Amino acid sequence: MAAKPVDRRAKRLVVLVSGSGTNLQALLDEIAATGAETYGAEIVAVGADRDGIEGLARAERAGVPTFVRKVRDYGTREEWDAALAEAVAAHEPDLVVSAGFMKIVGKEFLARFGGRFVNTHPALLPSFPGAHGVRDALAYGARVTGCTVHFVDDGVDTGPIIAQGVVEVRDEDYEDEGVALHERIKEVERRLLVDVVGRLARNGYRIEGRKVVIQ
Ligand SMILES: Nc1nc2c(c(=O)[nH]1)N[C@@H](CN(C=O)c1ccc(C(=O)N[C@@H](CCC(=O)O)C(=O)O)cc1)CN2
Ligand SMILES: NCC(=O)N[C@@H]1O[C@H](COP(=O)([O-])[O-])[C@@H](O)[C@H]1O
């Protein structure tokens, strides 16, 4: 049987953010430096759950369209989830990237983007899932932590792992509530996310149970 032809067009990415957007910036910088065709992807829109954040300002400076869908503007969480899914779908993404997006998405979003929704998390999953991965690792007394890039499923940070990076915890990390530790994690995380998204986009992938195979 003939092999499936490789799809060489630049894949369409929608990136979701809630804060400073340094992971988004790393993707923007790499695409600007390498070119969308060589990198394998272009960012077609950036979405957020709040306004007034540096993540949206970074997108605007790069000339990328933005949208905001706030939970409080909808009657129920389900309505917000459907509105977020609709806003993302309008940009016809091949992949959606949660880069510091601080909201759990629900059934409607996952029905449309499950299997192509990637999240980056600042801990070595399955340890320390949730909104406070850095703080929770320190509180537990972990001596190593790091970051995990994974596909999103209907749990919280439970989906199939694509790649991880390790960062050592230093004694002084207990003195600033994890601020410096989070910065060291983010240095590793930005490189990991840029590498993973590029490889997924260029090579294609399949998810076999809990294993992600990048072709
Ligand atoms: N269905 C899923 N949605 C999301 C996942 C996921 O694994 N499954 N990952 C997140 C990102 N994430 C950590 O990586 C994360 C973000 C936020 C929370 C959380 O508890 N959020 C609260 C609100 C907190 C706030 O607004 O500051 C909430 O959603 O109500 C946990 C984990 C992307 N989405
Ligand atoms: N659970 C989700 C979570 O904690 N996400 C984390 O928020 C930071 C966003 O930084 P950035 O806005 O500078 O890219 C990143 O460290 C990301 O892993």
Image (cartoon, rainbow, N blue to C red):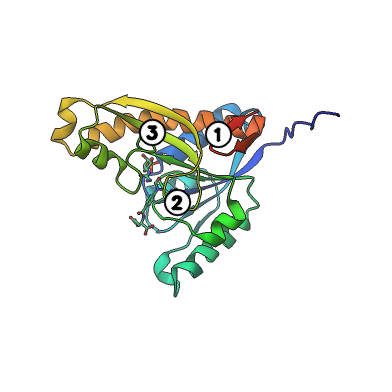
CA neighbours of label 2 inside 10 A, class few (<14), some (14 to 19), many (20+): few
Image quadrant where one finds the C terminus: top right
Image quadrant where one finds the N terminus: top right
Q: What residue is shown with label 2?
A: 155
**Quick check: 173 above or below 70?**
above
Total tally of numbered discs in the picture: 3
Q: Earlier in the sequence, mark 1 or mark 3?
A: 3
Work out whether residue 11 or residue 214 is closer to the camera in this orientation and state it: 214
Residue that lies at the very extreme toward the left in this rendered image: 175
Residue shown at the point (45%, 51%) measured from the top left: 155
Q: Earlier in the sequence, mark 2 or mark 3?
A: 3
In the image, which is nearer the foreground, mark 1 or mark 3? 1
Q: What residue is shown with label 1?
A: 211
CA neighbours of label 3 inside 10 A, class few (<14), some (14 to 19), many (20+): many
Look at the numbered disc 3 and say if its residue's Cβ is closer than 8 Å to ligand 2: yes
Query: Residue 87 got which mark?
Result: none
Look at the numbered disc 2 and say if its residue's Cβ is closer than 8 Å to ligand 1: yes
Name which quarter of the figure residue 22 lies in: top left
Q: Is 205 positioned to the left or the right of 170 in the image?
A: right
Residue shown at the point (24%, 31%) measured from the top left: 142
Residue 80 percent coordinates (x, y): 48, 66
Which kind of residue does numbered mark 3 sit on?
Cys
Are the residues at dot 1 and dot 3 in contact (C-beta closer than 8 Å)?
no
Residue shown at the point (47%, 57%) measured from the top left: 105
Q: CA distance from mark 2 to mark 1?
A: 17 Å
Judged from the image, the secondary structure of the residue bearing numbered disc 2 is: loop
Residue 26 percent coordinates (x, y): 46, 34
Q: CA distance from mark 1 to mark 3?
A: 17 Å
Which kind of residue does numbered mark 2 sit on?
Gly
